[in-house]
Image (cartoon, helix red, strand yellow):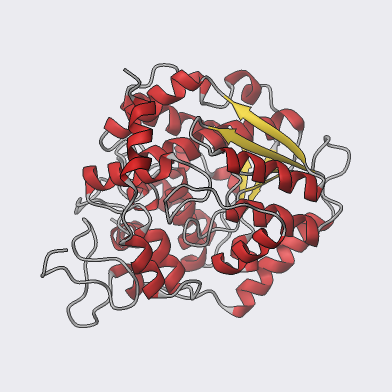
C-alpha cells in the first residue's frame, strides 16, 4: 500500500468511516462495501486537496477513478506530478 | 447514562456511542483531536467565491438562477431571506418537499417567506402512501447507509434528504438552473461548494438506488433522478450546490429571532431538533434504538467545535426527551391499520 492509500485509510479511520473495519483491500469498491457514500466521497476529496495541495477536477470523479483505494491513489499521484 | 460513560470534554460526543473513542489523556474524542478550524483567509476566500458566483449567474439559461430547498423551518427560511437580501437580483425557485409529515405551520411559513422574498414557491408532492411505506422500510432497515452517514442523520432522514436532493437536481437540469442552495448547518456539511458533473450525477443516482434496494424499496424510480433526463443532458452540464451557512456563519438563536421578527411562526412539534417535520423525533428515537447513535450528536458537536454553539446548550438539546404524543402520532401514520 502506497503513501496516498495509507493516508486515505488513516483519514477514513479517524473520521469514523470504517465502522469497525481495520483494513481495506486496495481494489475493493468503497461505495459498494458501505465505507462511503457521495457525501463521504466529497469529504475525502476535500481532505486530499488540502493534504496534497492539489485541485481535483470534478470531471475525473467517476467510479472508475474514485471508488477504490488504488484508483484514488493513482488519480492523486497523477495530479501531484 | 451508564456511570462509565465519558463525554468528550470539548464537544457532546460520548464513549457510549459506537465508533467514538475518548482519548484518556486528552479527554477529547477523535473528531476534536483532528479538528482544524477554518482560517480567516479561507473564510474570506469562500465569501469572495460565493459573491462572484451569485453576482453574475450564467445568463439566458432558464427562468431561475437558484433552486432553494425550503423546508419552512428556521434555517432554510432564514437562508432564503438572507440570500435575497444579499443578492436581490437572484431569481429563486423555492421547493418545499411534502413528505407527508410536514406541519401546517411549516407550509404557511414557507409560503410566507416566498412572498416576502418574491420567490416562486413550489410544493413537491409524491405518492404519500408509497412515501409512508418507504419511511417504514427505512426505519426497519439496518446498514442501508454507510457507517459515517449514521452519525450524520437517521436512516429515515437520510432517505428523505436523499429524495429531496435527487428531485431537486432533476429539476435544476430540467429548468436549466445553475445553482442549488441547501441550508445545511456547518455541522451537517463541511463543503461550501459542490460542482455536480454529469458522471457524478449518474454515480449519486446509482448509490441512492443501491441504498433504496437494501431497504427493500421497489418503487425506486419515483425517488431517483429520471434516467432519461440525465442521459439527454449534454456531457458538459454542471450544476453547483452551495451551502451558504458555511460562508455566513451559523447562529441558530439569532436566525430564529430574525425569522420571528419577519413573521415566521413556531410549530408545536415538541422536538428541540426540528422546526418543520413531525417525523424527526420518531426518526431520532428509531435511529437510537437501532444503532445507539443520537443522529444530532455529531451535527451539534461539530457546531460546538466551530464555535457556533455552546456545549451546555448541545448537551441540553441531546438530553431533552420527546413527547410520547408526537411519537405515537407518527406511529399511527406509519401503521394506519
Looking at the picture, does residue B292 appear above or below residue B51? above
Front-most of residues B121 and B306: B121
Give residue B170's quadrant in the image.
Answer: top right
Which quadrant does the N terminus of chain B fall into?
Answer: bottom left
Front-most of residues B88 and B200: B88
Question: Left of B55 or right of it: where is B270?
Answer: left
Question: Left of A49 or right of it: where is B234?
Answer: right
Where does the image place residue B56, in percent across and percent down from the top left?
85, 54
Where does the image place residue B195, in percent across and percent down from the top left?
63, 47
Looking at the picture, does residue B301 appear above or below residue B71? below
Name the residue: 43% across, 72% down: B304
Where does the image place residue B251, in percent across and percent down from the top left?
57, 68
Residue B22 visible, this orientation: yes
Name the residue: 70% across, 54% down: B263
Name the residue: 72% across, 28% down: B174
Looking at the picture, does residue B335 appear above or below residue B203? above
Where does the image place residue B292, in percent across and percent down from the top left?
22, 51
Which quadrant does the C terminus of chain B fall into?
Answer: top left
Residue B235 visible, this orientation: no
Name the residue: 45% across, 44% down: A66
Looking at the picture, does residue B188 appear above or below residue B10? above
* Labels in figure, total: 0
Question: Left of B52 or right of it: where is B166?
Answer: left
Front-most of residues A25 and B17: B17
Give residue B325's quadrant in the image.
Answer: top left
Question: Left of B234 or right of it: where is B294?
Answer: left
Amino acid at each position: 500500500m502506497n503513501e496516498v492509500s495509507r493516508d486515505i485509510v488513516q483519514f477514513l479511520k479517524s473520521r469514523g468511516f470504517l465502522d469497525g473495519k481495520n483494513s481495506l483491500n486496495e481494489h475493493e469498491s468503497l461505495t459498494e462495501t458501505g465505507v462511503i457514500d457521495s457525501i463521504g466521497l466529497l469529504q475525502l476529496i476535500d481532505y486530499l486537496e488540502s493534504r496534497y495541495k492539489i485541485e481535483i477536477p470534478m470531471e475525473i470523479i467517476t467510479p472508475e477513478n474514485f471508488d477504490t483505494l488504488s484508483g484514488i491513489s493513482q488519480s492523486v499521484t497523477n495530479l501531484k506530478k | 447514562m451508564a456511570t462509565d460513560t465519558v463525554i468528550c470534554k470539548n464537544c457532546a460526543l460520548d464513549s457510549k456511542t459506537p465508533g467514538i473513542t475518548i482519548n484518556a489523556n486528552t479527554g477529547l474524542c477523535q473528531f476534536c483531536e483532528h479538528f482544524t478550524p477554518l482560517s480567516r483567509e479561507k473564510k474570506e476566500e469562500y465569501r469572495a467565491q460565493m459573491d462572484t458566483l451569485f453576482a453574475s449567474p450564467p445568463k439566458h439559461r432558464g427562468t431561475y438562477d437558484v433552486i432553494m430547498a425550503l423546508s419552512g423551518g428556521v434555517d432554510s427560511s432564514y437562508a432564503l431571506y438572507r440570500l435575497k437580501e444579499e443578492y436581490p437580483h437572484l431569481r429563486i425557485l423555492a421547493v418545499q418537499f411534502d413528505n407527508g409529515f410536514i406541519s401546517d405551520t411549516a407550509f404557511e411559513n414557507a409560503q410566507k417567506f416566498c412572498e416576502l422574498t418574491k420567490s416562486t414557491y413550489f410544493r413537491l408532492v409524491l405518492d404519500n402512501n408509497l412515501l409512508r411505506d418507504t419511511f417504514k422500510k427505512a426505519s426497519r432497515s439496518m446498514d442501508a447507509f454507510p457507517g459515517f452517514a449514521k452519525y450524520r442523520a437517521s436512516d429515515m432522514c437520510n432517505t428523505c434528504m436523499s429524495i429531496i436532493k435527487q428531485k431537486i437536481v432533476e429539476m435544476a437540469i430540467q429548468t436549466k438552473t445553475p445553482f442549488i442552495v441547501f441550508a445545511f448547518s456547518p455541522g451537517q456539511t463541511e463543503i461550501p461548494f459542490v460542482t455536480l458533473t454529469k458522471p457524478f450525477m449518474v454515480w449519486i443516482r446509482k448509490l441512492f438506488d443501491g441504498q433504496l434496494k437494501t431497504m427493500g424499496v421497489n418503487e425506486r424510480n419515483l425517488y431517483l433522478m429520471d434516467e432519461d433526463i440525465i442521459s439527454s443532458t449534454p456531457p458538459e452540464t454542471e450544476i453547483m450546490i452551495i451551502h451558504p451557512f458555511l460562508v455566513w456563519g451559523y447562529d441558530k438563536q439569532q436566525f430564529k429571532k430574525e425569522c420571528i421578527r419577519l413573521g415566521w411562526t413556531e410549530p408545536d412539534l415538541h422536538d428541540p431538533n426540528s422546526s418543520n417535520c413531525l417525523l424527526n423525533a420518531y426518526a431520532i428515537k428509531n435511529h437510537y434504538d437501532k444503532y445507539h447513535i443520537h443522529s444530532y450528536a455529531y451535527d451539534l458537536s461539530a457546531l460546538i467545535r466551530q464555535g457556533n454553539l455552546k456545549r451546555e446548550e448541545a448537551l441540553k438539546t441531546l438530553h431533552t426527551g420527546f413527547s410520547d404524543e408526537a411519537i405515537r402520532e407518527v406511529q399511527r401514520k406509519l401503521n394506519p391499520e
